[in-house]
Image (cartoon, helix red, strand yellow):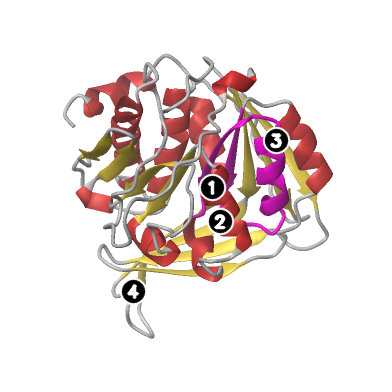
Amino acid sequence: MKNHLKRKHKQGLCGENRALFSFISPELPKYPKMSNLVVIGGVTLDSTCSVRDAKADFTLADSLCESLGGMAYNTAIASSQLGTRTKLLASAGPDLPPIKNRRNLVYDFCESATPTSHCFMFHDGEKERICFYPGSYNEIDENRAKRAIEQADWVHFAGVCPVFEELVNFSDTESKIISACPGYDIHHNDPKSSILRELVQKSDYLILNTDEAKHLGLPLDSIVNAGVIVTMGKNGSVLVEKEGRTQVKAYEVEVKSPFGAGDVFVGTFIAAMASDEAKNDATIATKLASAAASFAVEQETTIPELNWDEIKKRAKKL
């Protein structure tokens, strides 16, 4: 990884009352083809239920799907399916079930005596509710993570773990391309916390949904060093670049489960930018990511089988 590929320019915000999404990011760096990617975050045991009324104190479930998941796991699965050489670094307990080997993906689990994280997700087609048992989620070994970062070109931080503050600074010092998607974890952290500010200021790409962006209080009244993508569900996504904002539509499908779509979006975006698929064009990568996310929501399991040919067919309509 050449140092000149890593963007280090700092750029402030203009004005005190800038609207959400309307901030300026530096010029995008050129990415090496087929980067070695390390995804750092959590692996969870997922229980997903389609329920009658997600707002009710008591309701009935029409379906139950149990699978492996977690933001880091899902993102790594998506990127590796699309040809990016990926390492997943996460912490897991003794109850983690056997995981099948996948092409382009290496698992590096920090073993813990604490049970593996478990996420209980409920949705009724309109409303979502989530109950999260953290378990071993935060028990990522710092030195092990640093060794993985040293071997990578691109580092993606999925979620928010205490060790991320040190690791994102280490990645920046090592001139790695950095992306981050704080996800649901952002709601358990003070938006002014040092760990969130480091993720914002040191990331080349920050990916959030609308609720997460509002919690973070964007635009921040501090210097930012990130291109930002805000996903908005059925309303598509907004890509913010130096030249301005680009609205990307969502590909319309029948939604069976909303869970996992954001992780598929992130994994596809990274895979597109790290290869020839996006031609170093973030708008193309965002369209491909939006198309890929549509495959996630039209099934109950969180991560679909992905391939570029099918993704491109849908992306052409966006």
Could you tell me the amino acid type at mark 4?
Ala
Identify which residue, 248 or 12, lies in the foreground.
12
Query: Which region is colored magenta?
Result: 154-182
Could you tell me the amino acid type at mark 3?
Thr
First reached walking from the N terminus: tag 4 or tag 3: 4
Q: Position of residue 85 (x, y in %)?
A: 60, 22
- Residue wearing tag 1: 201
- Residue wearing tag 3: 173
Identify which residue, 94 or 286, lies in the foreground.
286
- Of the residues tagged 4 and 1, which is closer to the observer? 1
- Residue wearing tag 2: 197
Q: Is residue 32 above or below residue 302?
A: above
Q: Is 309 positioned to the left or the right of 91 in the image? A: left
User: Dots 2 and 3: beta carbons under 8 Å?
Assistant: no
Residue 258 visible in the current orientation:
yes
Could you tell me the amino acid type at mark 1?
Gln
Q: Position of residue 300 (x, y in %)?
A: 38, 50
- Residue wearing tag 4: 54
Q: Quadrant of residue 25?
A: top left
Q: Residue at x 67, y 53 (%)?
A: 165
Q: Secondary structure at mark 3?
A: helix
